Amino acid sequence: MKRLMSTVGTSKQDWLRKRKTGLTGTDCSCIVNMNPYRSAYDVFLDKTTDAIKEEDNEAMRQGRDLEEYVAKRFEEETGFKLRRANAIYYNEEHPVLLADFDRLIVGQKAGVECKTVSPFSADKWKDGRTPTHYILQTLHYLAVSDYDCWYIAALIFGTGFVIRKIERDQELIDHLITIEERFWEHNVLGGNVPEPDGSENYSEMLKSQYFNCKKENKVQLFGVESDLKRRDEIRELIDKLEKEKAVIEQKIQLQLGQADSVYGTAGPYNISWISTVSQRIDTGKLKEEEPEIYEKYLKEVQGKRFTVKKVKVNINAA
């Protein structure tokens, strides 16, 4: 493991720019489509463009502000002494693997990843469980550092404090290294967009890239009939689940209505059914009575509509 750059006094822009030169611990789970917040395409887009995206929100700020608290709690619970890494590191044999470590344990070949967790996600930590994307993040750190183990210290707001120890699994680490290096060589350096991942960003990319396809072309598609059959099954299942969901909501709404109340409780759930009134412009009437004003504020929105229609086959046709 070698130091790529010091983060002491480094601006966030420079830090983010340097992270574009390789794959980090948070990228790892995205590449294998095990991250609930980002996809492989998001990583591809980040590494293949010059844009520096400074994402921030209240949850991220609390995570930064409380990192020191989580580290102190870990020291109290374990008796270990921690130190800041203050650098971006890389693996000498696999230089595309980068890492920012929250803390390293003094006198041990081990580190700590500090997390803050919403109480709504507390169930993901029950019975010794650990979210998969966090495990993959620490395995990436073990790949970069060649350390023996890594700890995840998680503060679950208002609920508790948990520590998970992730032991070194060389077979799994080697597999992750292979996946990450292949992604970097084939996708990032090769300019090959990753396979579809279901993300909104991927859909927007497809719409933008293929917006001007020729309408007069009709092509024979190969290898997708089984996918389309599965799509039909999924739509039927969604319709069934949506109806089941509506029935549940109607039962609750009926109870609220009969009790002449807009608020209710049931165990850990708080329910509300509040009447709302909204005002909208009658665009049809506006177009008819004030066509000039309608045209003045008309905005063109471009998009691509995807439809699938199943053609009925006439079995009596000769």
Image: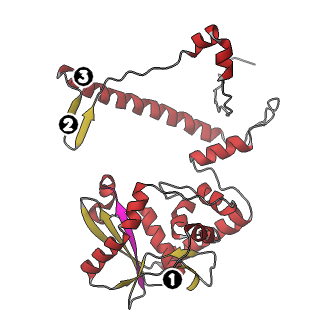
Locate residue 281, reporting x and y percent: 53, 18
- Where disc 1 sits, the SS reads helix
Task: Say above or below: 48 vs 225.
Answer: below
Three-letter code, disc 2:
Thr
- Please give the residue where the numbered disc 2 appears in the rendered image: 265
In depth, the one of 19 and 195 nearer the eye is 19
Locate residue 234, reporting x and y percent: 50, 37
Which label's residue is closer to the chain start, 1 or 3? 1
The quarter in which the C terminus is drawn is top right
- Please give the residue where the numbered disc 3 appears in the rendered image: 254
Residue at position x 68%, y 28% in the image: 300
Is residue 153 found left or right of 29 in the rendered image? left
Kindly indicate the quadrant of the structure image that contains residue 307: top right
- Where disc 2 sits, the SS reads strand
Residue at position x 35%, y 28% in the image: 246
Can you tell which of label 2 and label 3 is closer to the viewer?
2
**Residue numbers of the magenta segment:** 110-118
- Please give the residue where the numbered disc 1 appears in the rendered image: 145
Q: How far apart are marks 1 and 3 (CA)?
A: 59 Å
- Where disc 3 sits, the SS reads helix
